[in-house]
Image: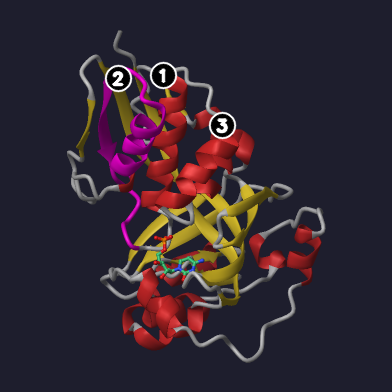
Amino acid sequence: MTVERTFRSFAKINLHLAVEGRRPDGYHELKTVFQTVELHDRIRLRTTPTPGVSLAVPDGGAPADSTNLAHRAARAIFERWAPEGGVEIELHKRIPAGGGLGGGSSNAATVLAGLNELLDMGIPTQRLAEIGAEIGADVPYFLTGGTALGTGRGDRIEPLSEMPEETVWLVDPGVSISTAEIFAALVPPATRPPAAGLERLLAGEPAETIAELGGWNDLEETVLARSPEVRNVYNALRRAGASCVRLSGSGGTVFACFASSGHSEHANSALPAAARVVVTRTLSRSTMARWRIVEAGDRSER
Ligand code: C5P
Protein backbone atom coordinates (compact mmCIF):
# COMPACT_ATOMS: atom_id res chain seq x y z
CA MET A 1 0.00 0.00 0.00
CA THR A 2 1.17 3.49 -0.82
CA VAL A 3 0.67 6.31 1.66
CA GLU A 4 1.48 9.95 1.14
CA ARG A 5 1.65 13.01 3.37
CA THR A 6 3.11 16.52 3.14
CA PHE A 7 4.83 18.06 6.16
CA ARG A 8 6.01 21.56 7.01
CA SER A 9 9.67 21.55 8.01
CA PHE A 10 10.18 24.71 10.09
CA ALA A 11 13.34 26.79 10.51
CA LYS A 12 14.89 27.83 13.84
CA ILE A 13 16.80 30.76 15.23
CA ASN A 14 19.17 30.70 18.20
CA LEU A 15 17.90 33.24 20.73
CA HIS A 16 21.11 32.59 22.66
CA LEU A 17 24.30 30.67 21.91
CA ALA A 18 27.17 30.33 24.40
CA VAL A 19 30.25 28.26 23.54
CA GLU A 20 31.42 26.65 26.76
CA GLY A 21 34.61 24.99 25.49
CA ARG A 22 36.14 22.52 23.08
CA ARG A 23 35.43 18.81 23.39
CA PRO A 24 37.85 15.93 22.83
CA ASP A 25 35.78 14.90 19.75
CA GLY A 26 36.58 18.25 18.04
CA TYR A 27 33.08 19.64 18.57
CA HIS A 28 32.29 22.49 20.96
CA GLU A 29 30.26 22.32 24.13
CA LEU A 30 27.26 24.63 23.71
CA LYS A 31 24.51 26.15 25.78
CA THR A 32 21.96 27.43 23.30
CA VAL A 33 18.30 28.46 23.27
CA PHE A 34 16.54 27.37 20.09
CA GLN A 35 13.28 28.88 18.86
CA THR A 36 11.06 27.64 15.99
CA VAL A 37 9.94 30.21 13.41
CA GLU A 38 7.13 30.03 10.87
CA LEU A 39 9.42 30.03 7.78
CA HIS A 40 9.43 26.45 6.49
CA ASP A 41 10.19 24.03 3.68
CA ARG A 42 7.60 21.51 2.53
CA ILE A 43 8.38 17.80 2.35
CA ARG A 44 6.11 15.28 0.65
CA LEU A 45 6.75 11.67 1.64
CA ARG A 46 5.28 8.87 -0.46
CA THR A 47 5.91 5.26 0.44
CA THR A 48 6.58 2.85 -2.44
CA PRO A 49 6.27 -0.95 -2.64
CA THR A 50 9.75 -1.14 -4.23
CA PRO A 51 12.76 -0.63 -1.95
CA GLY A 52 15.02 2.45 -2.16
CA VAL A 53 15.08 6.13 -1.23
CA SER A 54 14.64 8.77 -3.93
CA LEU A 55 14.78 12.54 -3.52
CA ALA A 56 13.58 15.33 -5.81
CA VAL A 57 14.18 19.04 -5.11
CA PRO A 58 12.04 20.54 -7.91
CA ASP A 59 12.74 24.21 -7.18
CA GLY A 60 16.45 23.76 -6.35
CA GLY A 61 18.02 25.30 -3.25
CA ALA A 62 19.58 22.05 -1.98
CA PRO A 63 21.36 19.04 -3.49
CA ALA A 64 18.98 16.33 -4.77
CA ASP A 65 21.36 13.49 -3.95
CA SER A 66 22.43 11.20 -1.12
CA THR A 67 24.39 14.02 0.63
CA ASN A 68 21.10 15.81 1.42
CA LEU A 69 20.27 15.33 5.13
CA ALA A 70 16.67 14.37 4.22
CA HIS A 71 18.04 11.50 2.12
CA ARG A 72 20.42 10.46 4.92
CA ALA A 73 17.57 10.47 7.43
CA ALA A 74 15.42 8.20 5.25
CA ARG A 75 18.35 5.81 4.68
CA ALA A 76 18.97 5.68 8.44
CA ILE A 77 15.38 4.50 9.01
CA PHE A 78 15.48 1.85 6.27
CA GLU A 79 18.97 0.61 7.20
CA ARG A 80 18.25 0.28 10.92
CA TRP A 81 14.65 -0.87 11.00
CA ALA A 82 14.33 -2.46 7.54
CA PRO A 83 10.64 -1.69 6.97
CA GLU A 84 9.27 -3.07 3.68
CA GLY A 85 9.35 -0.95 0.51
CA GLY A 86 10.91 2.46 0.04
CA VAL A 87 10.11 6.16 -0.03
CA GLU A 88 10.00 9.04 -2.51
CA ILE A 89 10.84 12.40 -0.97
CA GLU A 90 9.92 15.68 -2.64
CA LEU A 91 11.53 18.69 -0.99
CA HIS A 92 10.39 22.27 -1.66
CA LYS A 93 13.02 24.62 -0.22
CA ARG A 94 12.34 28.08 1.11
CA ILE A 95 14.76 28.14 4.05
CA PRO A 96 18.09 29.50 2.75
CA ALA A 97 20.89 26.90 2.94
CA GLY A 98 24.02 27.69 4.97
CA GLY A 99 22.19 30.47 6.77
CA GLY A 100 22.18 29.36 10.41
CA LEU A 101 18.45 28.56 10.25
CA GLY A 102 18.89 24.78 10.49
CA GLY A 103 17.06 24.02 7.23
CA GLY A 104 18.91 20.78 6.43
CA SER A 105 18.63 19.53 10.02
CA SER A 106 14.94 20.40 10.12
CA ASN A 107 14.40 18.43 6.89
CA ALA A 108 16.19 15.42 8.42
CA ALA A 109 14.03 15.57 11.56
CA THR A 110 10.86 15.90 9.47
CA VAL A 111 11.78 12.79 7.46
CA LEU A 112 12.64 10.79 10.61
CA ALA A 113 9.38 11.67 12.36
CA GLY A 114 7.32 11.55 9.15
CA LEU A 115 8.46 8.06 8.12
CA ASN A 116 7.97 6.84 11.69
CA GLU A 117 4.33 7.93 11.39
CA LEU A 118 3.63 6.92 7.78
CA LEU A 119 5.09 3.44 8.25
CA ASP A 120 3.50 3.12 11.69
CA MET A 121 6.82 2.10 13.22
CA GLY A 122 6.36 3.34 16.78
CA ILE A 123 10.03 4.37 17.23
CA PRO A 124 10.29 6.42 20.45
CA THR A 125 11.30 10.09 19.95
CA GLN A 126 14.40 9.54 22.11
CA ARG A 127 15.62 6.86 19.68
CA LEU A 128 14.90 9.12 16.68
CA ALA A 129 16.91 11.87 18.43
CA GLU A 130 19.91 9.53 18.82
CA ILE A 131 19.82 8.69 15.11
CA GLY A 132 19.26 12.37 14.31
CA ALA A 133 22.32 13.46 16.33
CA GLU A 134 24.49 11.26 14.08
CA ILE A 135 23.16 13.16 11.05
CA GLY A 136 23.66 16.67 12.48
CA ALA A 137 23.95 18.32 15.91
CA ASP A 138 20.74 20.37 15.38
CA VAL A 139 18.52 17.46 14.25
CA PRO A 140 17.32 16.38 17.75
CA TYR A 141 16.07 19.92 18.46
CA PHE A 142 13.69 19.81 15.50
CA LEU A 143 12.02 16.68 16.90
CA THR A 144 10.94 18.84 19.89
CA GLY A 145 10.69 22.41 18.54
CA GLY A 146 9.34 25.55 20.24
CA THR A 147 11.58 27.24 22.82
CA ALA A 148 14.18 24.69 23.97
CA LEU A 149 17.60 24.51 25.58
CA GLY A 150 20.36 22.64 23.75
CA THR A 151 23.49 21.47 25.59
CA GLY A 152 26.36 19.12 24.69
CA ARG A 153 26.95 19.59 20.94
CA GLY A 154 23.55 21.32 20.95
CA ASP A 155 21.98 17.86 20.64
CA ARG A 156 20.78 17.33 24.24
CA ILE A 157 17.38 19.01 24.30
CA GLU A 158 15.17 20.19 27.14
CA PRO A 159 11.93 22.04 26.35
CA LEU A 160 11.69 25.47 28.07
CA SER A 161 8.65 27.62 28.91
CA GLU A 162 7.25 28.88 25.63
CA MET A 163 8.01 32.47 24.69
CA PRO A 164 4.97 34.37 23.40
CA GLU A 165 4.85 34.32 19.57
CA GLU A 166 6.30 37.50 18.08
CA THR A 167 7.28 38.93 14.70
CA VAL A 168 10.94 38.62 13.72
CA TRP A 169 12.82 39.63 10.63
CA LEU A 170 15.24 37.13 9.14
CA VAL A 171 17.80 38.96 7.04
CA ASP A 172 19.94 36.87 4.69
CA PRO A 173 23.01 38.91 3.70
CA GLY A 174 23.39 36.69 0.60
CA VAL A 175 26.48 34.83 1.80
CA SER A 176 26.78 31.24 2.95
CA ILE A 177 28.91 30.73 6.07
CA SER A 178 30.74 27.47 6.85
CA THR A 179 29.89 26.42 10.41
CA ALA A 180 33.07 24.32 10.65
CA GLU A 181 35.25 27.31 9.62
CA ILE A 182 33.64 29.62 12.18
CA PHE A 183 34.09 27.15 15.04
CA ALA A 184 37.72 26.60 13.95
CA ALA A 185 38.43 30.37 13.94
CA LEU A 186 36.42 31.12 17.08
CA VAL A 187 37.71 33.71 19.54
CA PRO A 188 35.34 33.74 22.55
CA PRO A 189 34.43 37.29 23.62
CA ALA A 190 36.19 38.59 26.74
CA THR A 191 32.99 39.91 28.30
CA ARG A 192 29.36 38.92 27.99
CA PRO A 193 26.37 41.13 28.70
CA PRO A 194 24.15 40.38 31.71
CA ALA A 195 21.02 38.50 30.69
CA ALA A 196 18.53 38.47 33.54
CA GLY A 197 15.68 37.43 31.22
CA LEU A 198 17.69 34.45 30.03
CA GLU A 199 18.43 33.38 33.60
CA ARG A 200 14.69 33.51 34.36
CA LEU A 201 13.87 31.44 31.26
CA LEU A 202 16.43 28.80 32.24
CA ALA A 203 14.94 28.76 35.75
CA GLY A 204 11.54 27.86 34.26
CA GLU A 205 9.82 31.23 33.86
CA PRO A 206 8.77 32.52 30.46
CA ALA A 207 10.23 35.76 29.07
CA GLU A 208 7.83 38.23 27.46
CA THR A 209 9.85 39.18 24.39
CA ILE A 210 13.14 38.27 22.72
CA ALA A 211 14.44 41.79 23.48
CA GLU A 212 13.61 41.30 27.15
CA LEU A 213 15.29 37.89 27.19
CA GLY A 214 18.70 39.38 26.39
CA GLY A 215 21.31 36.73 25.63
CA TRP A 216 24.01 36.76 22.99
CA ASN A 217 25.76 34.63 20.37
CA ASP A 218 29.42 33.77 21.00
CA LEU A 219 29.98 33.10 17.27
CA GLU A 220 28.85 36.62 16.33
CA GLU A 221 32.15 38.49 16.73
CA THR A 222 34.05 35.92 14.66
CA VAL A 223 31.45 35.99 11.86
CA LEU A 224 31.19 39.81 11.84
CA ALA A 225 35.00 40.12 11.71
CA ARG A 226 35.21 37.76 8.71
CA SER A 227 32.20 38.78 6.63
CA PRO A 228 31.63 42.40 5.52
CA GLU A 229 28.21 41.37 4.10
CA VAL A 230 26.98 40.12 7.48
CA ARG A 231 28.53 43.14 9.23
CA ASN A 232 26.72 45.59 6.92
CA VAL A 233 23.36 43.93 7.57
CA TYR A 234 23.98 43.75 11.32
CA ASN A 235 24.99 47.43 11.57
CA ALA A 236 22.10 48.63 9.39
CA LEU A 237 19.57 46.83 11.65
CA ARG A 238 21.18 48.27 14.78
CA ARG A 239 21.21 51.80 13.39
CA ALA A 240 17.55 51.44 12.34
CA GLY A 241 16.66 50.99 16.03
CA ALA A 242 15.78 47.28 16.15
CA SER A 243 15.08 46.15 19.72
CA CYS A 244 17.04 42.93 19.14
CA VAL A 245 19.68 42.11 16.51
CA ARG A 246 21.50 38.79 16.64
CA LEU A 247 23.25 36.29 14.41
CA SER A 248 21.44 32.95 14.19
CA GLY A 249 23.73 29.94 14.71
CA SER A 250 26.91 30.49 12.69
CA GLY A 251 25.03 32.83 10.32
CA GLY A 252 24.93 34.40 7.84
CA THR A 253 21.26 35.08 8.75
CA VAL A 254 20.78 37.93 11.22
CA PHE A 255 17.42 38.18 12.97
CA ALA A 256 15.88 41.37 14.31
CA CYS A 257 12.88 42.46 16.39
CA PHE A 258 11.19 45.84 16.11
CA ALA A 259 9.16 47.58 18.78
CA SER A 260 7.42 49.80 16.21
CA SER A 261 6.62 49.77 12.48
CA GLY A 262 8.46 53.10 12.11
CA HIS A 263 11.71 51.36 13.01
CA SER A 264 11.10 48.47 10.65
CA GLU A 265 10.33 50.82 7.71
CA HIS A 266 13.57 52.60 8.44
CA ALA A 267 15.43 49.26 8.43
CA ASN A 268 14.00 48.32 5.04
CA SER A 269 15.52 51.34 3.35
CA ALA A 270 18.82 51.05 5.25
CA LEU A 271 19.63 47.43 4.31
CA PRO A 272 22.17 46.63 1.57
CA ALA A 273 20.57 45.79 -1.83
CA ALA A 274 21.83 42.18 -1.75
CA ALA A 275 20.09 41.46 1.58
CA ARG A 276 16.88 39.39 1.49
CA VAL A 277 14.30 39.97 4.22
CA VAL A 278 11.76 37.38 5.36
CA VAL A 279 9.27 38.71 7.89
CA THR A 280 8.21 35.74 9.98
CA ARG A 281 7.23 34.99 13.56
CA THR A 282 8.22 32.67 16.34
CA LEU A 283 6.06 29.56 16.85
CA SER A 284 5.22 27.69 20.02
CA ARG A 285 5.36 23.90 20.16
CA SER A 286 1.57 23.69 20.10
CA THR A 287 1.19 25.90 17.00
CA MET A 288 3.96 23.95 15.32
CA ALA A 289 2.22 20.65 16.12
CA ARG A 290 -1.05 22.00 14.69
CA TRP A 291 0.57 23.12 11.45
CA ARG A 292 2.98 20.21 10.93
CA ILE A 293 0.87 18.41 8.36
CA VAL A 294 -0.28 20.16 5.18
CA GLU A 295 -3.96 19.23 4.80
CA ALA A 296 -5.28 18.13 1.39
CA GLY A 297 -6.35 21.14 -0.67
CA ASP A 298 -4.34 23.59 1.46
CA ARG A 299 -2.55 25.72 -1.10
CA SER A 300 -1.91 28.69 1.19
CA GLU A 301 1.58 30.10 1.47
CA ARG A 302 1.62 28.92 5.06
O1 C5P B 1 26.77 18.93 13.32
P1 C5P B 1 26.94 19.88 12.17
O2 C5P B 1 27.20 19.16 10.88
O3 C5P B 1 25.87 20.87 12.08
O4 C5P B 1 28.28 20.71 12.50
C1 C5P B 1 29.06 21.33 11.50
C2 C5P B 1 30.47 21.63 12.04
O5 C5P B 1 30.41 22.66 13.03
C3 C5P B 1 31.12 20.46 12.76
O6 C5P B 1 31.81 19.64 11.85
C4 C5P B 1 32.06 21.15 13.74
O7 C5P B 1 33.25 21.53 13.09
C5 C5P B 1 31.31 22.42 14.10
N1 C5P B 1 30.55 22.29 15.36
C6 C5P B 1 31.24 22.37 16.57
N2 C5P B 1 30.54 22.25 17.75
C7 C5P B 1 29.19 22.06 17.74
C8 C5P B 1 28.48 21.99 16.52
C9 C5P B 1 29.19 22.10 15.34
O8 C5P B 1 32.46 22.55 16.59
N3 C5P B 1 28.54 21.94 18.90
Q: Amino acid at mark 2?
A: Thr
Q: Quadrant of the N terminus?
A: top left
Circle 3/circle 1 CB separation < 8 Å: no
Is residue 288 found left or right of 298 in the rendered image?
right
Image point (42%, 40%), residue name: 9
Q: Write down the region rendered in magenta.
A: 70-98
Residue at figure coordinates x 50%, y 88% from the top left: 187
Does any portion of residue 27 appear in the rendered image?
Answer: yes
Amino acid marked by disc 1: Leu
Q: Which residue is mark 3?
A: 289
Residue kind at label 3, given as amino acid type: Ala
Q: Nearer the viewer, mark 3 or mark 1?
A: 1
Return the disc, 2 or 1, that comes first in the chain's sequence: 2
Image quadrant of ligand 1 equals: bottom left
Label number found at residue 201: none
Name the residue furthest bottom: 190
Badge 1 element = loop
The alpha-carbon separation of the residues under discs 3 and 1 comes to 19 Å
Which residue does the numbered mark 1 point to in the structure image? Answer: 119
Closer-to-camera residue (245/91): 91
Q: Is residue 267 above or below residue 45?
A: below
The picture quadrant where one finds residue 8 is top left
Tell me the number on the disc at residue 47: 2
